[in-house]
Structures are given as structure tokens and as C-alpha cells.
Amino acid sequence: MFSISLELPEFIVVKQVFHKEYFHLYVVKKATEERCPFCGYMTGHVHDWRTRKVRDLKVLEKPLYLFVRVNRFRCFNCHEVFTQTFDSIHPNKHQTSRYRDYLYEQCLGSSIKSVSEKENVPYTTLERIFYSIAQEKEAEQLDELEQTLGEEDLVLSLDEVAVRKGHRYETVLMDAKTGRVLSMEQNRSYESTQLLLTKNVLSNTSVQTIVVDMWNPFHKAVHAVCFIFH
Ligand SMILES: [Zn+2]
């Protein structure tokens, strides 16, 4: 018998329904208890529950929908009611996190419009998903940037990279020793370079050297920013 391997270990599949155009899986969370977010006690007392329909990655080229049982627990200790949480689905979202990541990656390779049509996801929904994940990635990058900037004797390299075949360029700030990309801005203009450098980079005393190529706006921006911070 055909069976879908979900590969989301937190769930048990209780029912599978195969339609011609799509698949439905009914799932429940394995863990029957959850820690109260108000007082920290574990509780398994179900106050009520509902079903949330959640889109997941395609299976055999067909959309997969999960019907997730979402419990609300009532805490025995503090009597507050709270909603069950999931590792693979963010609160109140109608797509699994892995499907949202997949959509984001797809948009990077083409456009929101074409992915919306191909995946049959409304344009505005996809746009929201794309920008919310882009923001998360940027926050992660900033964390990394701060960590790198904490290192001593940092050598920065400022370079231009053609991101599309043709003439679109990005200004890229790299850790010259590791080659790690720290930040990017669109276009190789004076403004974009200055924007990159003012992301608290040159205010950090660990920066000893900046390597730049011969593209003039870089030099101009480096001088301008050094003037601000030094
Ligand atoms: Zn509680």
C-alpha cells in the first residue's frame, strides 16, 4: 500500500487521504504534554482543540496538506489556557516551516509572481512569506557580522559581484581571510558602499585593513566613512 513518509518526527499520522490532485494527511503531535508558558508547569489537560490546515512540501508533484490537531491546554497550576506549539510549524502559520523555506528559495531563483503561479499560492501570501524569511535571514547575518567583528585583526574586503548575467552588480563586504560574505548592497554606487560601511563596521576598532579594488566609488566611500569614525 502507498504511504507517505512525512519525516516530521514530532507527528503521528493518523489518516491518509489520496485525492487525484493532492494529498491529505491527518496528524497529531506525539508529545501529549506541554510546558505552560505562564508558570513553567507541565500539563496534558486538553481544554479544547481544533484542526488547522497546513500546506507542506509536494509529494510526487502533488500538493500535500496536513490537517493538524491543535490542542489548547489548561494549566493545572496557574489555570491559564495556552495553545500547543510545534517544531515544524510556527504559531498561526498555514505552511510548514520547511515549505516556507522552500518557497523563499524558489523566489530567489525566479520571481514571486512565477512561484505564486507555479505553486498556486496567492501572490500576497507568498510576498509576506518571502519578506518575513528575508528579514529573519538578515537578522541572522547581522548576528554573524557582529561575531566576526569581535575578532581581532579583521581584514575587510570590499568587492563588486555580478549577480545576474548582464549588468546587475552588488557591492559585497567580505572577511578577506575567510572569504565569508558579511553584507551586500545593491549596485556599485558610492551610496551603497557607504551604507555598507556604516553598518557599524568601521566604528569597530578591530578593523585594521580594508581591501578594495580599483572601482572608484569604493575608495570615495571608504574615505568618507573613515572620516566619520576616525
Ligand atoms: Zn501554568
Image (spheres, rainbow, N blue to C red):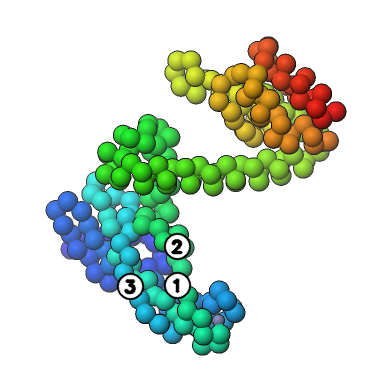
Badge count:
3
Q: Earlier in the sequence, mark 2 or mark 3?
A: 3
Which residue does the image show at 66% across and 46% down from the upper left? 143
Cα–Cα span, label 2 and label 3: 14 Å
Question: Going by the picture, which residue comes out furthest to the bottom?
Answer: 76
Q: Residue at x 71, y 44 (%)?
A: 147
Q: Which residue position is annotated with label 1?
A: 83
Q: Amino acid at mark 2?
A: Pro
* Disc 3 element: strand
Nearest the camera: 40 or 207? 40
Taking the image as shown, residue 26 lies to the left or right of residue 181, namely left
Residue 156 occupies which quadrant of the picture?
top right
Q: Foreground residue, 224 or 201?
A: 224
Above or below residue 211? Residue 41 is below
Answer with left or right where residue 6 lies relative to residue 132.
left
Q: Amino acid at mark 1?
A: Thr
Label 1 to label 3, Cα distance in Å?
A: 10 Å
Q: Residue at point 43% right, 54% down?
A: 97
Q: Quadrant of the C terminus?
A: top right
Q: Is the residue under label 2 in contact with that under label 1 (CB below 8 Å)?
A: yes
User: Which element is circle 1 on?
Assistant: strand
Residue topped by disc 3: 50
Identify the amino acid type marked 3: Arg
**Ligand 1 placement by image quarter:** bottom right
**Residue identifier under label 2:** 91
Residue 220 left/right relative to 43: right
Residue 13 seen anywhere in this rendered image of the structure: no
Quarter assignment of residue 10: bottom left
